[in-house]
Amino acid sequence: MRFTQALDFYQNNMARCKSEAEKVGFPLQIKAISGGGGKEIRTVKVLEDLEEGFKICMEEAKSSFGNTELIIERYLERTRHVEVQILGDRYGKVIHFGERGCTIQRLNQKITEEAPCCNISDGIKNQMYVDAVKLAESVNYFGLGTVEFLVTSKEEYYFLEMNTWLQVGIL
């Protein structure tokens, strides 16, 4: 769900935000749509904290990005962050290069990556590979990139985002 009103009109969006939050459920996250690298994210655990989190996130989004658009989404606790590396060619063919675990983070920034990702079954990895390739093929993706997922302790996984580049770490 997107909120596109300017900061001055944030209260006009609060009724809609509360309605959508009840559909999404708590805990949830409010994020700046123009954000990245963990900036302008607020976790809201109960309805009573929603308005404050919404206002703070909107102010930070305006200050950092000049854009007050926000999204809300379900917050999944104790997940693993897994990236599937992909390559798409000019002819519509996409392949994957396995996955990396990016769970060790500080302030929503990766500290280390592990490849292959441990403590996730091969069955879930293979399903993520299939879904990452399908997603990239559906948008005619060309180049290197990552399709990122959050994996719960019950081995359910959820799409997080797609990055149109590979991040390479050098030690």
Image (spheres, rainbow, N blue to C red):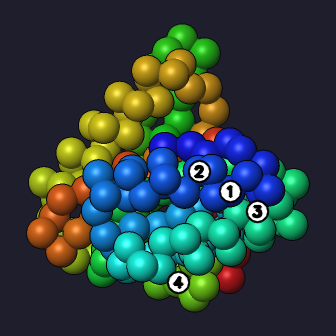
Question: Could you give the CA–CA distance between mark 4 and mark 2, rounded to whole angstroms?
Answer: 32 Å
How far apart marks 1 and 2 lie (CA) works out to 5 Å
Corner quadrant of residue 8: bottom right
Q: Quadrant of the C terminus?
A: bottom right
Residue matched to label 3: 61
Residue at left offset 41%, top offset 31%:
135
Q: Earlier in the sequence, mark 3 or mark 2?
A: 2
For the residue pair 130 and 60, the one nearer the viewer reads as: 60
Q: State the residue position of label 4.
A: 105
Question: Label 4 is placed on what type of residue?
Answer: Gln
Q: Secondary structure at mark 2?
A: helix
Is 85 rendered above or below residue 88?
Answer: below
Name the amino acid type tagged 2: Asn
Residue under circle 1?
A: 10
How far is disc 1 from disc 4 in space, using C-alphas?
Answer: 31 Å
Q: Which of labels 4 and 2 is toward the front?
A: 2
Query: Label for residue 13?
Result: 2
Q: Are marks 1 and 2 in contact (CB under 8 Å)?
A: yes
Q: Please tell me how crowded label 3 is: few (under 14), some (14-19), or many (20+) other residues with Cα within 10 Å.
A: many
